[in-house]
Amino acid sequence: MRHPSLSFDLGIIEDNTRMLARLCCDKGVIPVGISKLVEGVESIARAMMFGGIQTIGDTQIQNLIKLADLPLRKMLLRRVLLSEVDSVIEHTDISLHTERSV
């Protein structure tokens, strides 16, 4: 029995990222590549990096840890639990907060 699967064309991801990054940068916007859908797959993050992305964002710390070897800034895209603060400090470069208690 065959199972459904997804395939990604890394060249298209890189080309599309390059086009979007250029459009954003021309307007003074710094784009962030989002790896949430692909759970931190390094080859996809690398294609976004080659396309011009300098920051990768995800809602899961473990996905950002998978990308630790890539020379990209890592951004956590969700509220941090107090029990996660040490891990967030160790594995991310950017974490946005709305609560002073964190």
Image (tube, rainbow, N blue to C red):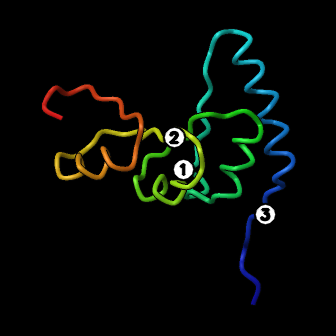
Q: Which residue is mark 3?
A: 7
The image quadrant that residue 28 belongs to is top right
In this view, 58 is above or below 99: below
Which residue is drawn at the image coordinates 62% and 34% (left, top)?
54
Q: Which residue is mark 1?
A: 36
Q: Which residue is mark 2?
A: 57
Which residue is drawn at the image coordinates 86% and 45% (left, top)?
12
Looking at marks 3 and 1 on the same chain, the residue that comes earlier in the sequence is marked by 3
- Mark 1 packing: few (<14 Cα in 10 Å), some, or many (20+)? some
Per the model, the C-alpha gap separating discs 2 and 3 is 21 Å
Q: Position of residue 69 (x, y in %)?
A: 56, 55
Per the model, the C-alpha gap separating discs 3 and 1 is 16 Å
Q: Secondary structure at mark 2?
A: strand
Which residue is drawn at the image coordinates 69% and 41% (left, top)?
49
In this view, 59 is above or below 29: below
Proximity of marks 2 and 1: CB atoms separated by less than 8 Å: yes
Q: Secondary structure at mark 1?
A: helix
Q: Is residue 6 left or right of residue 35?
A: right
Q: Position of residue 65 (x, y in %)?
A: 46, 57
Q: Position of residue 83 (x, y in %)?
A: 18, 52
Amino acid residing under circle 3: Ser
Looking at marks 2 and 1 on the same chain, the residue that comes earlier in the sequence is marked by 1
- Mark 3 packing: few (<14 Cα in 10 Å), some, or many (20+)? few
Which residue is drawn at the image coordinates 74% and 64% (left, top)?
6
Quarter holding the N terminus is: bottom right
Q: Secondary structure at mark 3?
A: loop
Q: Given this view, does label 2 or label 1 mark the residue nearer the observer?
A: 2
Looking at marks 2 and 3 on the same chain, the residue that comes earlier in the sequence is marked by 3
